[in-house]
Amino acid sequence: MKNILFYFFVFSFFLFKAQTYPNYKINLLSLIHPNNGTVGIGPDDRRYNGCWGWYQSSLNKEYAIVGGSSGTYFIDVTVATSPSVSAFVPGISGVTVREVKTYQNYCFITCDYGTAPTLQVVDMSTLPTTVTVVHNSNTLFASGHTHWIAGDKLYVGGVTYSNNTGSSMNIYSIATPSAPLLLRELKQDFPFISYVHDMYIRNDTIYASCGNQGLYVFKYNSGTNAFTQLGSYTGYTANAYNHSSGLTQDGKHLLFCDEVPAGLPIRFVNVENLNNIQAVQTWQPFTTTTPHNPFLIGNKWAVVSCYQEGLYIYDISQPGNVAVSGSFDTFPQGGANTGNYGGQDYRGNWGAYPYLPSGIIIAVDMQNGVFILDPTDAYNNPVGIKNNILQHTDLIVYPNPAKDKLAVHYTTSKASKLQLKNMLGQLILEKNFIGPINETLNTTDLENGTYLLTVYEHDFILNKKVVIGH
């Protein structure tokens, strides 16, 4: 029996590399380390930072976009078990903080370093073979710590200009992506805000993480080109550094992380009344863990990147009774699994992206590379990563297969967009809605085959494969 167990262990070790990383209900599909051939930054060997994802509908391909210490990697993850670098855009070297976000087929890259050109805009339409830099300048600002894109607006926090002055947060129009245009500085309306570290925006409502000043909620009014304050949440703990946040789909709850000092808990608050934001629950993966960046999916899941401990998935469907649903440790060399943090408070998992249509999760570890993860078991989904988190219970499509008509129902009070595409990524139909979607599509003239029906709402993408057969 001992020999059988030994050979089984050896076989499992080489076949399932996920077993080399402590994990619970999250499985490793692949690991890519494109920045491995260079020298990392500092004694802790920092090589990677911010990440995002992009779906190329024309080719039905998925990409991980990853900030590195010397530039940005565009990684094809369509085949999640064998990712490959499609393109690399060099930038300033020696960068610890490089952030990426997408708008249409453009990627916006900022970094918080020096005064050299740190705003890059990249046209990704020619992936997977190449990309084109269409903007590379420090004219608008010299550096920005983080940014967010909502609609055709770019919000940049922690702005520094070439003359060494700064702004807590700026908003730019990116209606012409290659030529962003400054609309307003937050300091013009609220000079008492000294710094916006990060922000989450929905419908021009900004949940601003203002470091040691706490959480502030602002509204940008495009008609008056001015900010107004809607609320704040401050003084909840002494000297906590409000770092980043995410909002549930129904807009009722906000989850945020405090980065400094190390070891502060994740906080979940009720924001239905912005004049009276209320604490709901606080928790930690471990007592000394530092949560870094949260990413919320619907009203059900929170995907949280944590220094030292890696990635955690929480079921937040019952506020006040949040439960762990899965975890994957991207930084096994330190943290609770070793019982020794060894000065590694701010090492390990930087960020993640859980919104690709396939449902895979991109998780970037500062030292160890880009992890492609399968959250199937964490989401308790028996059909696998395809059609998992994006099969929202409020999205109902029937009959499927369909013959002449296809009914689509989706419950929301917000603006949304409905698209139907064939498997080549060609757009068949597109409609915009305000409020619930109750639509019957005429499929009489469609060819037999499989189609992808997608509902876009804010930063949520809900997919459903449908089959047409006459």
Image: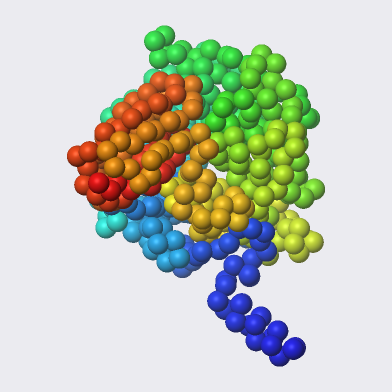
Q: Is residue 168 above or below residue 105?
A: above
Seen at 72% across and 44% down, the residue is 323
- Tell me if I can see residue 90 in this picture: no
Pick the front one: 39 or 229: 229
Q: Is residue 264 left or right of residue 36?
A: right
Seen at 74% across and 29% down, the residue is 280
- Tell me if I can see residue 335 in this picture: yes
What's the coloring here? rainbow
For the N terminus, which image quadrant? bottom right
Quarter of image, res 173: top left
Seen at 51% across and 55% down, the residue is 383
Q: Is residue 366 left or right of residue 285?
A: left
Pick the front one: 217 or 255: 255
Q: Which percent across, then down, holds residue 255?
A: 64, 34
Seen at 29% across and 46% down, the residue is 468
Q: Which percent across, then down, holds residue 121?
A: 34, 40
Q: Is residue 120 above or below residue 7?
A: above
Pick the front one: 270 or 437: 437
Q: Which percent across, then down, holds residue 421?
A: 29, 43
Pick the front one: 368 or 342: 368
Q: Is residue 177 above or below residue 203?
A: below
Q: Which percent across, then down, holds residue 267?
A: 71, 34
